[in-house]
Image: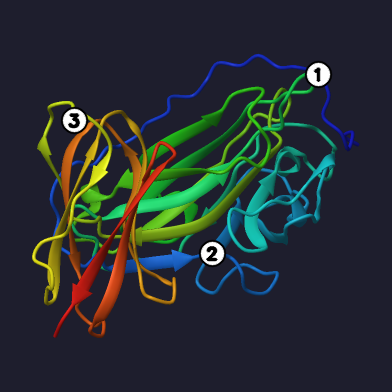
Amino acid sequence: MASTLRIGAIEMRFLLVTFFSILTIFPLPAQIKLQQNFEGPDSIPPGWGVYNIAPFPIDPEANWTVRDTGSALPGIATRTGKAHSGMRAIGVSWWAGIDTVTGALTQSDAWLITPRISNIQSGDILKFWATGGNGPAPVMYVDSLQVWLNGTDSLPSALEYHLASIVWPAGSLYGQFVEYIYDLSVAAGLDVWIGFRYYQDVTVDGFFVHVDDVSVEGPTSVDLIDRQLPKGFSLLQNYPNPFNPRTTVEFALARASKVSLKIFNTLGELTAELIDQEMGPGTFRAEWDASGLPSGIYFCRLHAGGLFESRKLVLLK
């Protein structure tokens, strides 16, 4: 039988990693078509599917399974389960590539498939947080994850459009979640299923991949209005203010950074997340549609490159 521990450093040819960028205007509010954080019972959420299509049986616990933070992982003695938010995430182990009859290490082919997602529109995006690999040295393995798309059926054999491949190089920090965002416009007008495929040659690589906080939604309305390098970081007062129910917020970035633009109520509760992505320097305009929210005072908070700035917004209906 295969050893319960992976040892040694591995070299492998990296898979192509495909990222999609979005810098255009879309109408608000963003419609949430799928949202899953895996905080329910220790089982696959309703409507989701888990499949092994490798030509050999595997340990079911090695396939995609919802686990608590700190829980034991199959085939791994040096790490425990992780989550991006809350206490639980879903993950798959390198053991999904072990034939439980012969004990041979081969190629895993383990799938996690979302429920049916209705009426994809141009500009809709897939967002999720994921992590893989087990660095740092001296024990390091490459990990990877494929993302597939289909508009006819929920089975792995029907997932025909390869949306992206993600590779975590040897030495990637274990449990360090990164957000991935992909444009679904190619499926506009269709109902779709999205598949996460752990297709890994475990004879040389593979460790453990976690996925958390999966969503499909329309993007926030964001417009680049000036590419000239601003003098500094700033968040301007929204206009109009007071407003009903839409308002515009402009902000400037002097350098590229991860940008978060969020709206909070007076209790400090998150009301809307307008932006959460990497952005280059420039001056930008974002819109917020507060339809369905009560009149009152709200606060817009911009966070970029370690800097913070807030503005008070007044919704008056």
Of labels 3 and 1, earlier in sequence is 1
Q: Is residue 264 among what the camera can see?
A: yes
Task: Say if 36 sits above or below 94 in the image.
Answer: below
Name the side, left or right, on which 118 lies relative to 122.
right
The image shows residue 79 at horizontal and vertical percentages of: 80, 42
* Secondary structure of the residue carrying numbered label 2: loop
Q: Nearer the viewer, mark 2 or mark 3?
A: 3
* Secondary structure of the residue carrying numbered label 3: loop
The image shows residue 200 at horizontal and vertical percentages of: 62, 33
Looking at the picture, which amino acid does disc 1 mark? Gly
Which of 29 and 20 lies nearest the eye of the viewer?
A: 29
Which of 128 and 105 lies nearest the eye of the viewer?
A: 128
Of labels 1 and 2, earlier in sequence is 1
Residue located 71% across and 22% down the image: 204
Mark 2 surroundings within 10 Å by alpha-carbon count, few (fewer than 14), some (14 through 19), many (20 or more): many
Q: How far apart are marks 2 and 3 (CA)?
A: 38 Å
Q: Is residue 116 among what the camera can see?
A: no
State the residue position of label 2.
37
* Secondary structure of the residue carrying numbered label 1: loop
Mark 3 surroundings within 10 Å by alpha-carbon count, few (fewer than 14), some (14 through 19), many (20 or more): some
State the residue position of label 1.
8
Looking at the picture, which amino acid does disc 3 mark? Pro
Looking at the picture, which amino acid does disc 2 mark? Asn
State the residue position of label 3.
230
